[in-house]
Structures are given as structure tokens and as C-alpha cells.
Amino acid sequence: MFAVNPLRPGWLTWSESSARFTRVILGPNQVRHSKVAKRRKDTQRNLAPHLKASHGKRTNTQLALSYFDDHYGKIYGSLWPSLRLGLLSRTKNAALVNNFNVAPQVKDQLSALGASSLRSYLPGQCPVRLPPTPRRATPAQPPPDRPTISDPHVEPEESREPELLPSMPLDPDVLYGRVIQPQSQSWAGHQTLHQDDYVPPTQLQGLDAELEAEFVDSQHYDSYLSVGSVQIEIRAEPGPYFPPHLDAYLFPYSSFEAFPAPKRTLADTFNYFCLDAASLLPVVAMGLASGDRVLDMCAAPGGKSLAMLQTLLPSELMCNDENAMRLRRVSHVMDMYLKGVKEMAGVVSYKRLDGSLMHSMYSNYFDKVLCDVPCLTDRVTARDDHNNLFSASNKHHRLNLPITQAGLLVSALKCVKPGGSVVYSTCTLSPIQNDGVVFTALKTIWETTDIECYVRPFHDLMRFHGDGRGAKYGQLVLPDITRNFGPMYLARIVRTR
């Protein structure tokens, strides 16, 4: 005979000799059988998410997948089953070489494993940079007072004036005919998804009643649709240029191997850092130059900040995150890979600030800003029930994500100097949180400030970005079972005044 005391972990057992209950405390490695059974059920659901829970209540991951199936299924069509399989499969990582270590030996070790340098995946297998954009016969001249940032890796004789594409109102009837047509560079020959092809709320059918109500009534979707009066200036420019000191290694597309765990070296630092290969794209897109002041507005978990330092270009890198625990994780990553490196003394700083308010303290201060915002994190929400954004406790946070993201991007544009640039990135396939947030942020900037900026689109930045599909104002990396990178969206906005 026994009973469970809900106040303390352990059991109450009846002792015949003392005629009283005796508490048996569980050891540190012991768990109750009920927890073991729950853990076994959770594992079974993760391995077979299509099966319903026996008690009839759907888990957070099942809610997320149901939402993705209904929403993304309409957006991506026949491509969605492949994307879904990629989200539920293991990410294809890259090994970022630590330049503050014995880099040549690390590269030899990675090559011996069968991995190849990221440079071999550049279009045309260019060793350092992407080929410049062909010059038009009569390109429009940029404003004479527009400041510029010189790139030390661009030879003067190869510099070209940017091509100015005419500004056009964001009218759904004319968007399809805009100049930027990334499908012309598609690897697989599919038609490119356009922002205005995405499903309006009146056509959202088959969703769970609660999810449909949340999506239709959310404030951010209304603001996303009301952008017809905004004019977006788009300029096609050369670059971005691949930093000469940044290097990472990948296994071939057909390989499902994983890199061994990084090891400490004699210098007490790790030899390489494993991260999603698509996470390097925002760093490349920033176009870092020597001596830049750089802000990583939402730095955690720290992989992109580390990649920026591996370029050996920034003179100052501020890593900011509002969450203290996540900021400590960034600091821990830096200690593991840069411990004792004298060259980094005074370069890296840490701030715990609300990113949407940073412009009040650092207005016109930075040369480059990375705005890698919190998002749906499709891959995580589809696989992990813990702290899932589709849980009831995170409902308000999930619905307000686009508003938060737009606020961060507006603040980033105010923090960057005229002539500098902001790279906005997410790890979701949601069009509302990608191009939709860029629309909303630029609309706010033009209505409330005198800041002028333009979108610098880039497509086919790397060969591993899926099947070549792009977004209207940036690059969208689509996961695939053989090239399982991303999802990752990135857009670059250049401030001119």
C-alpha cells in the first residue's frame, strides 16, 4: 500500500514495524514510472507526428504541423511535402573554421572527412567573391550626396555604379511584372513565389477554428495588406563579396554524414563551430568592410556573431539580447572560441537592451546591423514540444511576432549610419514575417522619419539555397531532404540618408 505525495518527489510506504508511513526519497538518477511512460509517449509522437495522441488532445508540435500543412500547403503547393520532410529531418550543418586556432590543420582534417570548402559552392566557383552584376548601357546615376562605404576587396577599376530600378507602387496588379524576377535564375525551373500570391484571410479554409480566427483577426495581417501607397526603391548592385578569411566546410549534397563534435586544442579553444549552413548567408550578405562598427541586435545563440568575427573585419561588434540567459550563452560561445585571443580584446561587447529601443542610445552609430529577429522557428516548433510557440502560454507572443519584428527592423534602420546597411533575417517560411515585415517597417520609416533607404535584392547567393526560389525583397532558403539547410530568409536594406 502506498500513496504519492504531490509536494515532494518520492513515495510514502507503510511500515508494519513502526505502524506509520515512511517517505522513500528518489535518488538523482531515479524517476517515477509515470514520467518514464510520458517520456516514451512523447518520443513516439515525435517519431510519428502523423499519429494522433491516445488521449485525444493534440500536442504543440501537432498544432504547429497542422498550421503549417494548412497555411504553407496553400503557399508552396506541390513543393510543401518535400519542405515538410526537410523540417522534420536532421539539419545539414556546416563546420565554421576557427581562424584563431591552427586553421590549416583544421581544414586538412575536415577535408579528410570528405567535406569541401564553402567557396566551392559559390556561383561560378569564384574563389573570393561573387561576379559583379552586368552594367546597363545607360544606368541611372545615384544621388551625388549619397554617402558610400568603400569595400577594401573591390579593385577601383572593377567598381561599378549601382543600377537604379524604377520605384513602383506595391499594387497587386503590377507586382508580378516588376523587374526583379528571381525565377529567371532558378536552378530547378520552378516559378518564383510572389508576395501577393500568398493566401488572403478570406481564402483560409480548413484551418482549425481557433487558428483561423487568430490569423484573420491579427493586427499585423491587416497592416501587411495595406501597403499599396508605399513605394519601394530597388537597386541591383555588385556583390556581396565573400570575406577572404571566412571559411566553412560542407559535406556533399548526397551525403547524410554529420561532423564530429568540435575538440579543444592546445590553445584551449575549439577547432570549429557547427551551425546550419544557411546561417552564414546573412553574414555574407552584410558586406562587411575593414573597420566596421557592427551590431548584432538579437545575437543569441551566437553563431552569426562568431562568424562575423571570423572575417577579421569588424573593429567593434556589439552583441545584444534582451534575455539575460541567452546573452550569457553568446558570451560562453565567444569564450570557447576566442579565449585568450589578444586581437579580440576590446572588440566584442555585450548589451542587454530592448532592440526596438536601441535607436534612442545608438542613433546613426553603426556601419552594419544584423537584425536576426525572433520568429516562428519552423524547424524547432515542428519537432520540439518544450516551450513551443504553439502552446497556450505562448499564444500572445506568437500572434505579436510580426509587430515585434517590424519594431526591431525600424530601430535597426535608425541605428545604422547613412551609407550603411541592415540585413534582416528569419528562420521561417512565413511570408508575413519575411517580406511582410520588410513592407511594414519601410512604410513606418517613410511615414514617421526623413530616413531614405532602398532594398538591395540578391538572388542565388549560394548554390545550396534549395531549388532557387526567391522572395520579392530578399532570398528564401528552402529546406530539402538532400540539401537540408534553413529555412532562412534574408533581405538587405541600405540607408542613403
Image (cartoon, rainbow, N blue to C red):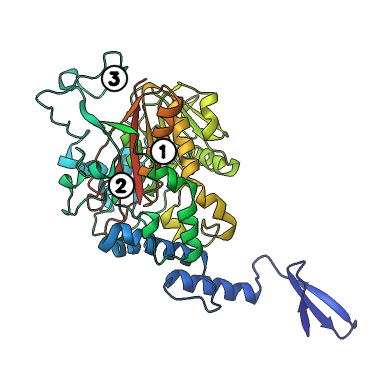
The residue sitting at 32% across, 60% down in the picture is 74
Identified by mark 2, the residue type is Gln
Residue 259: x and y, percent? Answer: 35, 54
Quarter of the figure with the N terminus:
bottom right
Q: Nearer the viewer, residue 425 or 10?
A: 425
Residue 118: x and y, percent? Answer: 26, 43
The residue sitting at 52% across, 34% down in the picture is 355
Q: Nearer the viewer, residue 217 or 297?
A: 217
Task: Kindly report which numbered mark, 3 or 2, lies closer to the viewer in this rendering.
Answer: 2
Quarter of the figure with the C terminus:
top left
Q: Is residue 88 visible?
A: no
| Tag of residue 150 | 3
Residue 405: x and y, percent? Answer: 46, 41
| Tag of residue 440 | 1
Asked if labels 2 and 3 touch by Cβ distance under 8 angstroms, the answer is no
Q: Judge the density around disc 3: few (<14), some (14-19), many (≥20) Cα neighbours within 10 Å.
A: few
Q: Which residue is mark 2?
A: 195
Q: Is residue 296 left or right of residue 2?
A: left
| Position of 294 relative to 375 (above/below) | above
